[in-house]
Image: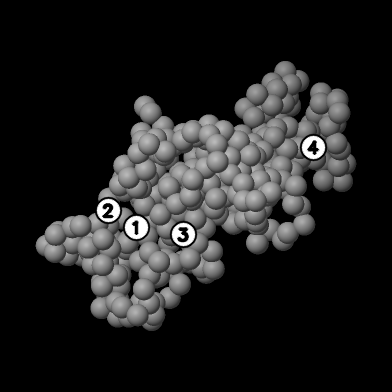
Amino acid sequence: MNPAISAVGLCKSYGDKTVLDGIDLNIAAGSVFALLGPNGAGKTTAVKILSTLVTADAGQARVAGHDLRTAPQAVRAAIGVTGQFSAVDALITGEENMLLMADLHHLSKQEGRRVTAELLERFDLVDAARKPASTYSGGMKRRLDIAMTLVGSPRIIFLDEPTTGLDPRSRHTMWQVIRELVTGGVTVFLTTQYLEEADELADHIAVLDRGKIAAQGTAEELKRLVPGGHIRLRFTDPVAYRAAVGSLPGAARNDESLALTLPGDGSQRALRSVLDRLDAAGIEADELTVHTPDLDDVFFALTADTHQPKETLR
């Protein structure tokens, strides 16, 4: 299957500042792709290029099978974009915002009303549909924003930090919305300042730093790139504990809690190696836990900017 988005060598500079320095992307259709990076890493610039809002200085890209340079109109017809700042007009009602978007997509009045009604229902906005958008909560405005993006039935949606500023409940609601979009076959290109969000939603993650892709892969693959993973075994029987110490040379001991800790990358191979050695010696641990680094650890290890608090990483 052809990728929903592919890019090779994308570059973009503003004056003497290089924002993107030859990035490559390959994003599968019907998946969630998350682009992480510190403030100023180039995430929003990447979204603007791939959504035809700005032109790359160099490189090639295809979105929904169309070349960005030669067929930008075809790309625009296939995508939807929800930026960092809401496109909702606060002076009119939610329903009027939706109908305005339907007009912009050249839908007939009947079709526009049908699509509007369906999307307001889908995003739980029916009760608020005829109220001014200025009265909406942040989460409601974000849901309306994405509903407006879906009026044109895009196959690919760019969500640039869609949950910034939302409370935890509204953020989890947005996560469910994104999961439902993907279940319906939509491809989601997500930038986020919340590492937990990428971990929860993304099938594939790329970490952008100083205009370059520092690493990419699944969340689990990225977590294995940084040190700190380990396997912990705990025993209640001192005899079994001492036998395990002899069978697992190099393990860090905690004689008080009868626990052993061994380095491990969280892979099945590392775990099997430990279990095989215990089985060969006829030893059974009472508790086994596998600890792997989280995306925060990955982010700090891979990016140059290590001084921002986790809550504001972008």
Marks 1 and 3 sit apart, C-alpha to C-alpha, by 10 Å
Camera-side residue of 242 and 269: 269
Which badge, 2 or 4, comes first in the chain's sequence? Answer: 2
Of all residues, the one furthest to the left in this rendering is 110
Image location of residue 123, percent across then percent down? 32, 63
Q: Residue type at mark 3?
A: Gly
* Residue at 72 percent of width and 18 percent of height: 280
Image location of residue 77, percent across then percent down? 30, 47
Which image quarter holds the N terminus? top left
Which badge, 3 or 2, comes first in the chain's sequence? Answer: 3
Camera-side residue of 188 and 208: 208
Camera-nearest label, 4 or 3:
3
Tag count: 4
Marks 1 and 4 sit apart, C-alpha to C-alpha, by 50 Å
Which residue position holds label 2? 152
Q: Residue type at mark 1?
A: Thr
Which residue position holds label 1? 149
Which residue position holds label 3? 83
Verify CB contact (< 8 Å) between mark 2 and mark 4.
no
Whether residue 10 is situated above or below residue 35 in the rendered picture: above
Marks 4 and 3 sit apart, C-alpha to C-alpha, by 45 Å
